[in-house]
Image (cartoon, rainbow, N blue to C red):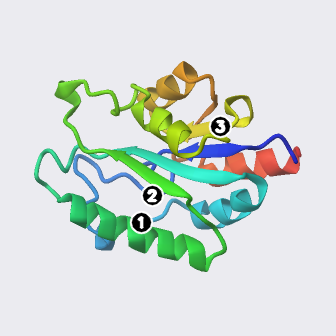
Amino acid sequence: MNNLDTLFLDRDGVINKKLEGRYVSDFSEFEFMKGAVDAIAKLTLAFNRIIIITNQQGIAKEIMSATDLHTLHAKMEESIEISGGKIDKIYYCPHLESIDCKCRKPNTGMIEDALLDFPKIVIKESYLVGDSESDIEAGKRMNLKTIKVDNEYTLSKWASELLSSI
């Protein structure tokens, strides 16, 4: 195909807006970044799979439960699917940053789990899009092509650039 295998996406700051100084704990607080849903729909057609990898220490801090997170993600996925996009799997790290677990980015445990679950992933044809240094570091540790986005250079802008070049 177009040498686009797997797209790993961070969630907060990439798919949805970050809340200043707190966590998105309910879908009522979840606001998609401008153009993100449409971008994911277009990227779904270009990539073999799209996987979300997200640090969610709000669970360990008891701000939300794993059930709350699953409910939020189900509603997010439903909105994405209505627009023609598809998320193949969501991995999350519920641990506190202070624990230094293997799954919390910049560690690579969530990506490694994805490689076990999806053994056909071709790393050299895969990307990671994130908004933090820990996202980018995790991607680089796994030899993924990394893209750092922010409120100006969004997932939507990157997707337009990528898709116009293939």
Q: Quadrant of residue 142?
A: top right
- Outermost residue to the left: 62
According to the picture, the residue beneath numbered tag 2 turns out to be 16
- Marks 1/2: CA distance? 5 Å
Q: Is residue 164 above or below residue 140?
A: below
According to the picture, the residue beneath numbered tag 1 turns out to be 31
- Marks 1/3: CA distance? 24 Å
- Is the C-beta separation of discs 1 and 2 under 8 Å? yes
Q: How many marks?
A: 3
According to the picture, the residue beneath numbered tag 3 turns out to be 127
The answer to whether residue 79 shows anywhere in this view is: yes
Crowd tier of the residue under label 1, counting other residues whose Cα lies within 10 Å: few below 14, some 14–19, many 20 or above: some
Q: Is residue 37 above or below residue 152?
A: below
Q: Is residue 146 left or right of residue 45?
A: left
Q: Camera-side residue: 158 or 115?
A: 115
Residue 18: percent from left, percent from top: 37, 51
Is tag 1's residue or tag 3's residue first in the polypeptide sequence?
1
Q: Secondary structure at mark 1?
A: loop
Q: Quadrant of residue 120?
A: top right
Q: Nearer the viewer, mark 1 or mark 3?
A: 3
Q: Is residue 53 left or right of residue 88?
A: left
Is tag 2's residue or tag 3's residue first in the polypeptide sequence?
2
Q: Secondary structure at mark 2?
A: loop
Residue 112: percent from left, percent from top: 48, 32
- Outermost residue to the top: 141
Q: Residue at x 67, y 66 (%)?
A: 41
- Is the C-beta separation of discs 1 and 3 under 8 Å? no
Q: Residue at x 23, y 58 (%)?
A: 66
Q: Quadrant of residue 64?
A: bottom left
Q: Amino acid at mark 3?
A: Tyr
